[in-house]
Amino acid sequence: MSHAIAALVSASPYRWGFLLSIVVAALPPVVSAWMAGRLGHWDAWAWFPPVFYFVIIPIIDHLVGRDTRNPPDATVPQLEHSLFYAALPLACVPLQIGLMLWGAWVFATAPFGPIGAAGWIISMGCIGGILGINIAHELIHKTSRLEQWAGGLLLSTVLYGSFKIEHVYGHHVDVATPRDTSTARPGQTVYAFLARALRHNIPKAFALDRARAVRRGAPGNRIWRSELLVWYAASAFWALACVLIAGTWQGLIYFAGQALVAVCLLEIINYIEHYGLQRRLLADGRYERVNPRHSWNSDFLVTNLLLFNLQRHSDHHAHPARRYQVLRHFDESPQLPFGYATAVVLALCPPLWRRIMDPCVARYAQTSSPDTANTSTA
């Protein structure tokens, strides 16, 4: 037994890193409010969290570097059934809800000017993207009812319950094809991508939900039976809670603003994850099966810990139910030259993004071949 425990610990040397990453993700707005309360300069401190996430983290990411190790196959079943790893995403549910509601109180009571108010909304939107949507993304792919509902509840805190349906039944089916509104075309700017994704993904989710209802034998026009209504009703509850906590309609501005920032952050990540990658159209009119060549992979350790291995996206799309702690690096996957925190900043500057990424797309297209699609990913 002692040998089995030792093997399990050595197979996942960063298990405590995932726990620490939750603290690191949640602390910046708390530090921001505490420092502003002691030193003043609320408008400046309101911007500390995005500076931390998108300036300090990329620097640390670069200094620490990559980790391409995979868990040994013999330890994967134990790791996948570990209650420790299962508990971490679930622990983020009360944390995200608490931070989101606390943020409404700070927004209403702190002496923010317009610049500070915008900074605080963006800061809390970053929290919603990391602890809300990112963790929800891990949970909604699981089969357990508890994890599914926990994921939906997290998405309700950022007004994006539709992601639970569209991502699983839309994006994962159509990824890297022209049908997918969450796959960026070669040369497409992040702003054009955002406009398209935000315009189409919510209606697409309702259409997919109706189609699922029909397949289950329920009338597709009975919108009140839609799962999506549950999550948007929960969003309405959170909006009301923010108004009551703030004591003013400023709470609604805060709630809608942080949700918009979180959703935009998600879609920017979607833009990065599949930029310029395309599945081959086969002779029978179908697209080739999704494999690790259809998502950009990144093994920068710090951001992988912070995002629960979201950057090992190639394995995630090849095996969506695989849990975050056992996601793998594949040499044949396209490799980002940086972590997601850096990529978000670069994507917001399209000329710089294209200057770096378009050659990466072209090189990968030249070096990959249909033969590499048949890689062993079991």
Image (spheres, rainbow, N blue to C red):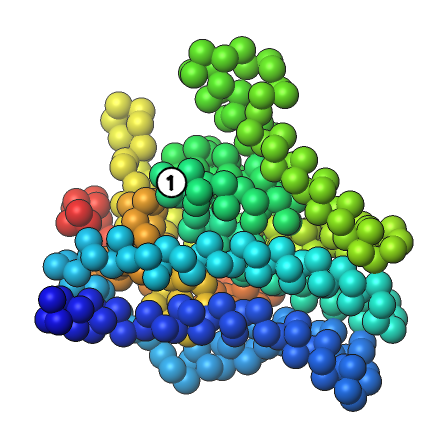
Q: Position of residue 111 (x, y in %)?
A: 87, 73
Q: Say which residue appears at 76% left-offset and 49% top-offset.
A: 241
Judge from the rendering whether residue 242 lies leftward or rightward of residue 363; answer left or right. Answer: right
- Amino acid residing under circle 1: Ser
Observer able to see residue 289? yes
Using residue 283 as the reference point, say whether residue 214 is left or right of it: right
In the depicted structure, whether residue 267 falls above or below residue 309: above
Q: Give the tally of numbered discs.
A: 1
Between 289 and 91, which is closer to the camera in this rendering? 91
- Locate residue 366: give its quadrant: bottom left
User: Is label 1 in a helix, a strand or a loop?
Assistant: loop
Residue that appears at 36% across and 65% down: 298
Left or right: 157 as drawn, with respect to 357:
right
| Residue 200 spot, x, y in % from top left | 60, 35
- Quarter of the image with the N terminus is bottom left
| Picture layout, residue 52 above or below residue 280 | below
Left or right of 49, for residue 283: left
In the image, is residue 132 above or below residue 336? Answer: above
- The quadrant holding residue 140 is top left
Which residue is located at x 71 percent, y 58 percent? 101
The answer to whether residue 54 shows anywhere in this view is no
Residue drawn 28% across and 57% down? 82
| Number of residues whose C-alpha sits closer than 10 Å to that of mark 1, classed few (under 14), some (14–19) or many (20 or more) | few
Return the residue found at the far front.
Answer: 1
Residue 45 placed where, x, y %? 74, 79
Asked whether 362 or 245 is in front, the reply is 245
Residue 246: x and y, percent?
Answer: 83, 57
Report the front residue among 79 and 215: 79
Residue under pointer 1 = 144
